[in-house]
Amino acid sequence: MSLKMIVVFLVMLSLFLPITLASPPAVSCVGCDGKTSEIVTNGINAWQTFYAKEGSPITLRGSSGFWQDEAGQAIGDGSSWSFTAKDNAMYILKSPSGDFYATVNIIPLSSELPETISDIYVNGDEIENHGKIETAQGNSLKLKLVVTKGDCSVYHIEWTSDSPVITFSDFDSLSTIAYVGGYSGKNPTITATIYSENRERQKIRDIGLEIHKNTPPAINIDWEPDSVEVESYERFTVYFEGSTTGRSGDEDGDYIAVVEAWLRDASGKLVSHSRRTMDRQMPLPILSLTSRSVGQYTLAVQITDRYGATDTADVTILVTEKGDSGRDKPVVDSPDDINCVAGEVCDLSINADGDTFIEYLYQGKRMIKPFKFPPGDHEVIIRAYYLDENGRQRNVVTKPVWVHVVANASAIPEPANAAPIAREDLAETSPLGGASAVIVAWRILHRRRILKS
């Protein structure tokens, strides 16, 4: 056969080619069940059956064209059509390459329920239906239902409560966690409901909760070194033994969950901080803090129970010179109250060992003997300390003394323990001024010789 005859044959074949070779439109069903039949077509039009569960949201999608219902009424201006499966129905996709008939058959939902539903399990313990359990605000409860399905293949579970303080991790699962957010004054009920697939039938199990109101914990603290004075740049420890969770016997599962401590200087600036969390099995921890330079600090501590209630306390920490043990303090022997006469010398002499240096402070300034006061009550701070081999003050102690000054001697009361009124003018000067400076230097030199020997 010549090439010319072959070309003529192909042209004639294309003119008389049956329209059955045209491709039918493609349609998919989103949300339909997997039981979909094969496409049936006569070459121009196509038929396909889809299956959907009652109440399912369905979307039919075509490659092109628009949708009509069985009556021929247009129901969509595009190739996608969405609806809720309620009854058996047929929809028609009008396509340039033919019509596609999509039949959606409804699969009825089951009204079957599981054969048996066990009682509710709470934290692994079986609780009878309508039973009650005790708990406390802040608790979490592990809940579980065990069912025997029988012929029931599909069902729904829902956890609810008649109180907004109860929430669930999974409200539609056989296992969930219920969170007890607080106590509103009413003991709530937790309900587990099993629904049939069509939600026309149900079975219910419930339990009551008796919630105990949380009480704040009570803090008890101690620290080492066993003194309010700590050496500078020294780490010291804070103990919480003896702290309680309040009326713990009334609170299910309560325990101290957080301990925390802050060390701040006199200006309120944070110097050191420590925090520990724990569970109910852990003993109360020991916190470690670090002091800084010499001065007064505030140690603030706090404990928090597992339900968020707290208790706090604070103490004053005095930081001494580095290396000062704080155990060898000068002993200041003086009365708490001294009576004097205005215009006359007031004797503020105290008893102390020979290595003790004494200063008298009045209204924040160091006083120089002889001491005279105007009428009235005056607070004098006695400051005693030792000097080390380098002349630095160590083991400083202070003591307040009240000086009561009257206009004349006849007005002075004479209790048995009153100090005698000074009548002589003492010529001594401050330990840090005048002749006593020589004494200080001699004591330093003398102590160095002792240390070397």
Image: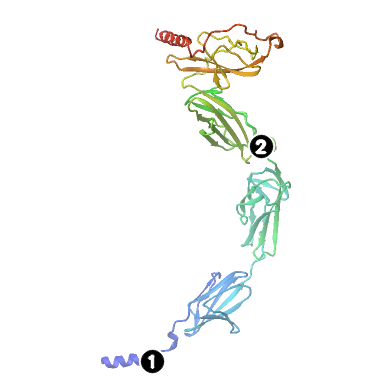
Kind of residue indicated by mark 1: Leu
Q: Is residue 381 above or below residue 281?
A: above
What colour-coding does the image apply? rainbow
Where residue 135 sits in the image (x, y, percent)? 68, 43
Q: Is residue 431 above or below residue 88?
A: above
Helix, strand or loop at label 1? It is: helix
> Which residue has dot 1 on it?
15
Q: Please report the residue visible at 50 percent of the width from the left and 12 percent of the height from the top.
A: 431
Res 109 → quadrant: bottom right
User: Mark 2 near mark 1, Cβ–Cβ under 8 Å?
Assistant: no
Q: Mark number for residue 216?
A: 2
Where residue 164 sits in the image (x, y, percent)? 68, 52
First in sequence, mark 2 or 1: give its number: 1
> Is the residue marked by circle 2 packed among few (<14), some (14-19), or many (20+) residues within 10 Å?
some
Asked whether residue 107 is in view, the answer is yes
Disc number lying in front (2 or 1): 2
Helix, strand or loop at label 2? It is: loop
Q: Quadrant of the C terminus?
A: top left
Q: How many marks?
A: 2
Nearer to us in this view, 113 or 137: 137
Q: Please report the residue visible at 62 percent of the width from the left and 6 percent of the height from the top.
A: 423
Where residue 94 sits in the image (x, y, percent)? 52, 83
Where residue 157 sits in the image (x, y, percent)? 64, 58
Q: Residue furthest top?
A: 424
Between marks 2 and 1, how big is the CA–CA gap? 95 Å
Q: Quadrant of the N terminus?
A: bottom left
Asked whether residue 115 is in view, the answer is no
Kind of residue indicated by mark 2: Pro
Q: Is residue 24 left or right of residue 251?
A: left
